[in-house]
Image (cartoon, helix red, strand yellow):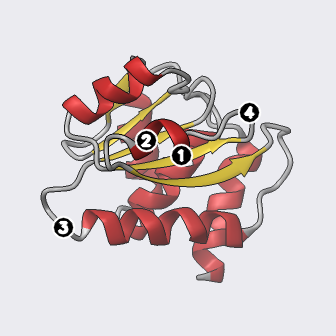
Amino acid sequence: MDITWVTERIGLGGGIWHARNMKELAEAGVTHVVNMQHEFDDRPLAEVHGIEVLWNPTEDDFLPKPPELLKCGTDFAVQALHDPNNKLYVHCAAGVHRAPMMTLAILCALDWQIEEAIALVETTRPVVDFADVYVDSVRRFLAWS
């Protein structure tokens, strides 16, 4: 399973795709998933494990993303992380563009400063490619919220 723990309770990575990968996430203590990929809906795989999934399908088209898209994900994540026993996995297909954008928004919603959050994500998951348009989308979301 392609997962990087950005914090002790927030994982970031690529697609789940198969029941065995969802089982691995459940065994790692993941209780909630934000799925940013439009390619695959994880909800049927998660049901058997009691994992809550927000399917927030997003094209990786390098176009600005609306604040409402990021709000949907951050609201779900912040609510999930309110319980200290919960762990969150944020993913897209490869964990390079869309999921890092959402992880950045989530960290900022948890009171991280955007530059420190970018540095944390890039340090823990070096394959991340923060496209300027996606970082700008997070900045617009933060100004909007």
Residue 46's label in the rendered image is 2
Residue 70, image x, y percentages: 62, 64
Task: Name the disc covering residue 83, or none.
Answer: 3
| Residue under the point 56% across and 41% down | 99
Badges 2 and 4: C-beta atoms under 8 Å apart? no
On-image quarter of the C terminus: bottom right
Looking at the image, residue 83 lies above or below residue 30: below
Secondary structure beneath label 4: loop
- The type of residue carrying mark 1 is Arg
Q: Which of marks 1 and 4 is in front?
A: 1
State which quadrant residue 110 falls in: bottom left
The residue beneath circle 1 is 43
The alpha-carbon separation of the residues under discs 2 and 1 comes to 5 Å
Circle nearer the viewer, 3 or 1: 1
**Outermost residue, left side:** 85
Residue to which mark 4 is pinned: 39
Question: Along the polypeptide, which appears first: circle 2 or circle 4?
Answer: 4
Mark earlier in primary sequence (3, 4)? 4
| For marks 3 and 1 on the same chain, the one whose residue lies earlier in the sequence | 1
Q: Which amino acid does label 2 sit on?
A: Ala
Residue situated in front as seen by the camera: 23 or 15: 23
Mark in front: 2 vs 3: 2
Task: Give the quadrant of the N terminus.
Answer: top left
Q: How far apart are marks 2 and 4 (CA)?
A: 16 Å
Measured Cα–Cα span from mark 1 to mark 4: 13 Å
**Which of the two residues, 145 or 13, is positioned nearer the viewer here?**
13
Q: What residue type is labelled 4?
A: Glu
Residue at image position (42%, 46%) is: 47
**Is residue 108 toward the left or the right of residue 132 in the image?**
left
In this view, the residue farthest toward the bottom is 145
Relative to 3, residue 98 above or below = below
Q: Residues within 10 Å of mark 2 (few under 14, many from 20)?
A: many
